[in-house]
Amino acid sequence: MKLKVHKGTDEIGGSCIELKTENTTILLDYGTPLQDTSEQVKIQGKVDAIVVSHPHQDHFGAIVDIDTDIPVYCGELSLELMNATKIFTGQEILKNNFKIYSAWKSFEIGDFKITPYLVDHSATDAYSFLIEADGKKVLYSGDFRANGRKSKLFDNMIKDKKLKNVDILLMEGTMLQRSNEDFPDEQSVEDKIFETIKENNQISFMIGSSQNIDSLVSAYRACKKAKKIFVIDLYTAWILEKLKIVSDSIPNMEWKDVKVIKKFGGSYYSNMSKNKEYFKGYISEVFNNIVDIEEIKANPQDYFLKVSPWHINKVLNECELKTSNIIYSQWKGYLKEEFSSVDTAELFNNLEANSNWVYAHTSGHADLPALQKFATAISPKKLIPIHTQYKEKFAEFFENVEVLSDDESFDINSDIAIPYKSDKLKDDAIKDKAIEEWIGIDLDGTLAFYDEWRGIEHIGKPILEMVEFVKDLVSQKKKIKIFTARASNVKTIPFIHKWLKENDLPKFEVTNVKDFGMIMLYDDRCTQVVTNSGVIVKKEEN
C-alpha cells in the first residue's frame, strides 16, 4: 500500500490524502483550502472512491469538481449538512454518487477495508478511519478533540485494541502550537456565556458556526439558566432540524424556549423556495414558532440571537438599540483578512468596537496533551503529521515521526518516501507547459523602502519607479508573484496584501518558494550569474 498526502503536510485546510494498492485508489477527504493563496489540489489519474470524514468545506468542498460517477462515502447527517452549506449559500445541491456509511460498521472499497470511528469535533458527524489493505493498517485521525460534549468517544478510541500498533497514524496537529487554556472545554464556554448575559442585561448575539452543535448547545443551556429566549435564523433552524437524525436531545424550533426569526432571512427563504422538493413541509413548519422583530424590540434584554453577523446591525437598528452583548464563539483567525474576506474582517472589527464583545470558544481540535495521549495509546509504527503548519515540531513531542511533503509518496510496505519532484518531472512539466511562467518581485528594498526590521505589520513606502514598472508588467499580462522572506511566516501575508491594495497593485500571490516557472527575479540583493558558465555579472561601478 502506498500513501500520498496531496495537501495537509504544511497547512490547515484543503485536506486530501491518497491511499493506493495495486488495484484500488481512494482519497481520504477532498477539501478546499482555507487561504486564498493556497492552490486547490487537482487529482489526476483514476480514483475509485472518495471517503469524506466530516462536513467542513476544507474536507469536502472540492467534490463538486469530480466526475459524478465516482462514489463519495460519508455519514448520513454529514450529507445533509454538506447540502445545507451549498443550498443556503445559493449553490446547487450536491450531485455526487453518495454512499452512506455508519459508525463502527466496516465497509469495503476494492482492496480496502474501512472502519469509521465517530469522533468528538466541532463538526457533528465527524469520523476517524481505520483502513486495512495488503496486510497493513492505517489510522486517519481526521479532525478530532477530547474537550467537547462527546469526549467519551476519544476515551473509547484510545482503549480500542484494534487500533493499537497500527503501521501508520496520520494525525492532525492544528493545535500543536496553540493553547486551549482559556476555554478548555464546552462547559467553560457555557459558563462564560451565562456570566455575560446574566450580568449585562441587554440584547445578546452569538457569532459562530451554525454547524458547531456543541457551541449551540452551550448557548442554549446558558440561556435557559439566565431565563433568556434562544432565537435562531432559518438556516440554523434547518441545521437543528436535521440533528433529529442522530439525537432528540438537541434544542430545535419545536422547543418552547426556542424561537425562529424570519426578519432579514429573505435570502435563506429564497434558497429554500428554489429547493421545495428537498425541504418539503419544513418551508411551512418553520413559521409555526416565529418571533416578530417588534416582540424583540419591546423587551430586547430577554433575547439571545444566533443569526448571521451581517444581520446584527440590522436587528439593532430595527430595535433602535446602540449596543449589545456579542459572544464570539469561533476561531480568532477568522477576525483576520488572511482567513476571511476584507469585508468580513471589517465587519467583525466594527462590531467589536461598538459592543460588549466577549470571546467564548473552545477549539474543535485536540490540544497538545490530548494529541500526546492519543499517540501514546495508539503507539503507531510511524506517525505522519497532517493538517498542521508545524510538522517539523512533531518530533519534539512524539515518537516514530515520519515527516512528508505534499505529493510525496510513501511506500508503507518498505518504509520508503519517494520525493515528488525530479528532473524528469521538471522536463515533462516544461515540455507540456504545465508550469506557468512568472516573474518574482522582491518586496523590502525593491518594491518598498527598507531601512530596518520593524515588525510584520510595517512595510515601507512604495518605491514609485518600481511600482510603475510592475504595473507595466501587469499590463503586458505577465504573471507576478511577490517573492519575499516574509512569506516564511504566513501571518505576514495579509499585511502584504493590504500594502499592495493601498498602492493600487493587484493581490499578487506571495511566496518564498522558487519553482521551475520563475523566469526572472527582481531583487536588490541579487547578483546575476551567466547560465551554465559560473561567470558572475558584475555591476557597473559609478
Image (tube, helix red, strand yellow):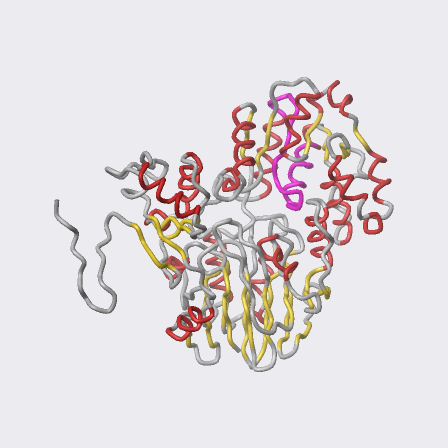
Q: Which residues are magenta?
A: 198-223
Horizontal side, residue 218 vs residue 374: left or right: right
Identified at 59% across, 32% down, the residue is: 327
The residue most toward the left is: 541
Count every numbered label the image shows and give the total: 0
Q: Is residue 249 magenta?
A: no
Q: Position of residue 292 (x, y in %)?
A: 79, 26
Identified at 64% across, 29% down, the residue is: 312
In the displayed structure, 312 sits above or below 176; it is above
> In terms of depth relative to the viewer, which is nearer, 468 or 410?
468
Identified at 74% across, 49% down, the residue is: 243
> In terms of depth relative to the viewer, which is nearer, 96 or 17?
96
> In terms of depth relative to the viewer, which is nearer, 257 or 499?
499
In the displayed structure, 252 sits above or below 18; it is above
Which quarter of the picture shows residue 17? bottom right
Q: Position of residue 441 (x, y in %)?
A: 34, 49
Q: Position of residue 282 (x, y in %)?
A: 83, 44
Horizontal side, residue 6 vs residue 160: left or right: left
Q: Is residue 210 magenta?
A: yes
Which image quarter holds the C terminus?
top left
In the displayed structure, 377 sits above or below 12; it is below
